Amino acid sequence: QVQLVESGGGLVQAGGSLRLSCKASGNIFVINAMGWHRQAPGKQRELVAGITTGGSTNYADSVKGRFTISRDNGKNTVYLQMNSLEPKDTAVYYCNAHNSYSRRIDYWGQGTQVTVSS
């Protein structure tokens, strides 16, 4: 099993910044990628950004140029730096980890609330 613990959410004004962190523990050797999804009220969960163990990244079009995902393999931690935040970014943000054996996202964090006020 893999456990994911997120931190760093909160309330920020439009144009502000936040950094989310997600620390993985347990059987981390099965993980070959980590990332973030988000879910706003009344909407489906959507991909925000992902990063492989090799450092390759991908982003949703809506956050490109504003959000940056990074990872510290030594600390088993992935980060999401969010700049120029907009009210539409308000959501619960979930960390996730991709299992190299099952080839799917098997692990999720508990979620952290990000609220951007106008």
Image (tube, helix red, strand yellow):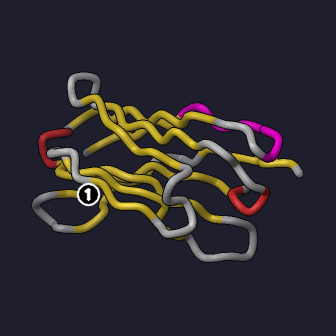
* Outermost residue toward the top in this view: 74
Question: Viewer-proximal residue, 116 or 8?
Answer: 116
* Dominant secondary-structure state across the stretch colored magenta: strand
Depth check: give the residue in front, 46 or 109. 46
- What range is drawn magenta here? 7-14
Q: In the drawing, does residue 76 fall left or right of residue 67? A: left
Check the image and name the residue furthest to the right: 118
Which of the pair 73/68 is nearer the observer? 68
- Dividing the image into 4 quarters, which one contains the N terminus? top left
According to the picture, the residue beneath numbered tag 1 turns out to be 98
Q: Label 1: state its secondary structure.
A: strand
Please state the horizontal and vertical placement of residue 4, each as a whole percent of the image.
40, 40
Q: Is residue 46 left or right of residue 104?
A: right
Residue 11 included in the magenta stretch of the image: yes
Look at label 1 and name its amino acid: His
Query: Magenta stretch containing residue 2, yes or no?
Result: no
